[in-house]
Amino acid sequence: MNRSALVVTVMFILFLATSVVLAAQSTRPTQGRSVGKELDVWVSKIEEHVVPTADAMPEEKYGFVPTAGTFEGARGFAEQVKHLAATNYILGSAVLGEKPPHGEHDEKAPDSLKSKAETMEYLKGSFTLLHRAAAAINKENEEEIVKFDRTRPGLIIDALIHCDDHYGQIVEYLRMNGIVPPASR
């Protein structure tokens, strides 16, 4: 066999081997992600921003309410965090078909929460409930309207949007107090 025929044969063998490998890879089933699992990823993403940001405010400033500008009737820092968490509990409980665990209503947290430590535990618990709610969403129940004229995925999305809104507010409150938010460090 001459040299050019050998080169063509080797190239043909390499082409066949590559084709077999690519064909084998393309026939492997791809792993999908359910709606509930995808939403849980997003719950984690917002939790990773909100919790450290809420924790960044020192206890002595947890009652901070802005006064410069037009902030009449604005919630203070702790109230922002408690409101965010209470809404997580309300919406997560609706997904699960349960009553909110602490009697939350009207997007208000229990009056018993006084300290930063209590508020932080309450906030973390609200994300634990949202994770449980997202995990409960499956193909059989994802399209059902359950509460507030929303589906289960819709309720989780409402919670995420609400978290994002209040995350922005607590970031601003940190900056008003000369504190760089954790995500900006």
Image (cartoon, rainbow, N blue to C red):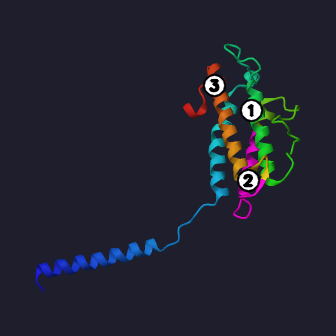
Give the residue number, with chain letter if any, for mark 1: 81
**Is 3 on the left or on the right of 175, as rendered?**
left
Spot occupied by residue 144 in the image (x, y as percentages of width and height):
75, 58
Q: Earlier in the sequence, mark 3 or mark 2?
A: 2
- Is label 1 in a helix, a strand or a loop? helix
Q: Residues within 10 Å of mark 2 (few under 14, many from 20)?
A: many
C-alpha separation, residue under disc 1 versus residue under disc 3:
13 Å
Give the residue number, with chain letter if any, for mark 3: 172
**Is 64 on the left or on the right of 113, as rendered?**
left
Q: Residues within 10 Å of mark 3 (few under 14, many from 20)?
A: some
Disc 1 and disc 3 in contact, CB within 8 angstroms? no
**Residue type (three-letter) at the residue carrying disc 3:** Glu
**Magenta stretch: residue 8 in it?**
no
Residue at 60% x, 61% y is 33
**Location of residue 179 with respect to 151 vertically, above or below:** above
Give the residue number, with chain letter if any, for mark 2: 152
**Location of residue 140 with respect to 15 vertically, above or below:** above
Frontmost of labels 3 and 2 is 2
Residue at 43% x, 75% y is 24
Q: Earlier in the sequence, mark 1 or mark 3?
A: 1
Magenta region, residue range: 123-145
- Quarter assignment of residue 4: bottom left
- Is label 2 in a helix, a strand or a loop? helix
- Quarter assignment of residue 31: bottom right
Residue at the far top: name it. Answer: 68
In front of the other: 9 or 156: 156
Q: Looking at the figure, which quarter contains the N terminus?
A: bottom left
Whether residue 127 is visible = yes
**Residue type (three-letter) at the residue carrying disc 2:** Arg
